[in-house]
Amino acid sequence: MHWCSWTTRSTSRSRRPEAEIAAVPAPTAQGAPLPQRRSQAERRRSRRRATLKKYGTVFLFMLPWIIGFVCFTAYPMIASLYYSFTRFDLINNPQWVGLQNYRDLFTTDPFFRQAIRNTLFIVVLGVPLNVLFGVGVAMMLTKARSGASFYRTVFYLPTLAPAVAVALTFMVLFNPGTGPVNQLLGALHIGQPLWFYDPNWSKPALLILGLWTAGNTMIIFLAALLNVPRQLYEAIEIEGAGPLRTFIHVTIPMISPVIFFAVVTGVIDALQYFTQAYVIGNAVSQQTDQLGEPQGSLLFYALWMYQKALPGFAMGYAAAMAWLLFLVTMIATLILFKTSSRWVFYQGSGR
């Protein structure tokens, strides 16, 4: 009886709650003080050190990009903004002239307005033509029943060629005397333009050259068209809509974000049109100091800015032209973004 009660008491003692056991302080060495809890200030300092360490690690990973941005983007932009208010020729020290460079652009520069007109020609005609051509080719490729991959490759390959090589190739194709284009037109008893040697035909020839390299635009339109839900076409077909109404009311709204992207990037590129005009103009004039030939018909804004900067060494004037181009590009882009809400539709946006 006594043995049973002793066993019960010992068992109950051994089954004390674990929380109670955990609350019993561990024995310490004789004379050693018990550890004290850290104060609130110490905990704040510890958290602050951990946060600084975390952000310091992120900063170290970003440091190469920050150095590159400061050295190759931020500093050149700030320096060019300063030089745009100076007279600077890369040899002598810059002389502050205030807004004189900007005034000269609009009042005394004889080629400024011509460069603006030529650039607007590419923006107003070249960009819409590239978009329409890209959409048309992409729609044809979606209808291809066999060999679709081959045709996509054929239309995209020209974009991989360097711009200089493409310009020289079109100089050969559009050669007035021996070019295959004029040979074909002559065989068909059609008039044979002088193309790049005629100021009236030089810019239209550049538009045709631009279509040759429209593969980038075509490939994004092809992806957008393949992503249009088929049930939309089926629904409007049941309503009795023809191909034109289907294109206007289904295809265009569904690919409008891609059209918006193509227009924005096209406008930005057209405002900086340079390489093709530079190569063809030099080939026509046979001289490197006469740009924009024939008769200034290929003198675009970026080309005239280059002419003032390097051969002319008017770096302050060229910097003012560069900042004016930057301002115009920003305004054009903002206008496109502000007006996009009227004609760009996004899936799931409720519009």
Image (cartoon, rainbow, N blue to C red):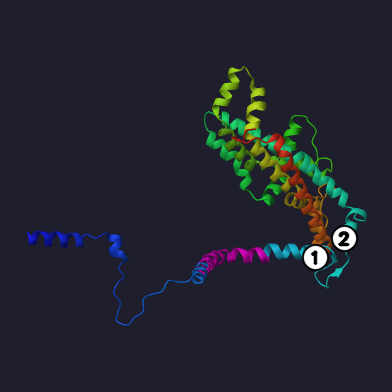
* Residue 337 sits inside the magenta stretch: no
Apparent side of residue 133 relative to residue 223 in the rendered image (left or right): right
Q: Position of residue 88 (x, y in %)?
A: 83, 67
The amino acid on which the numbered mark 2 sits, given as a three-letter code, is Asn
User: What residue is at 58 percent from the left and 24 percent from the top?
Assistant: 233
30 or 99, nearer to the observer: 30
The answer to which image quadrant residue 316 occupies is bottom right
Q: Residue at x 79, y 44 (%)?
A: 196
Quarter of the picture holding the C terminus: top right
Task: Evaluate whether residue 288 shows in this view.
Answer: no
Q: Nearer the viewer, mark 1 or mark 2?
A: 1
Closest to the observer: 220 or 234?
234
In contact (CB < 8 Å): disc 1 and disc 2: no
Instruction: Indicate the amino acid at tag 1.
Output: Tyr
Query: Which residue shows up at 30% across the image and 64% down it?
Result: 22
Residue closest to the eye, 308 or 60: 60
Give the answer, above or below, for where 171 lies relative to 231. below
Q: Quadrant of residue 205?
A: top right
Residue extending furthest toward the front: 2
Q: Secondary structure at mark 2?
A: helix
Query: Can residue 1 be seen in this snapshot?
Result: yes
The residue singled out by tag 2 in the image is 101
Magenta region, residue range: 48-71
- The residue carrying mark 1 is 82
Report if residue 68 lies within the magenta region: yes
Alpha carbons under labels 1 and 2: distance apart:
12 Å
x, y percentage for residue 255?
A: 63, 34
Quarter holding the N terminus? bottom left
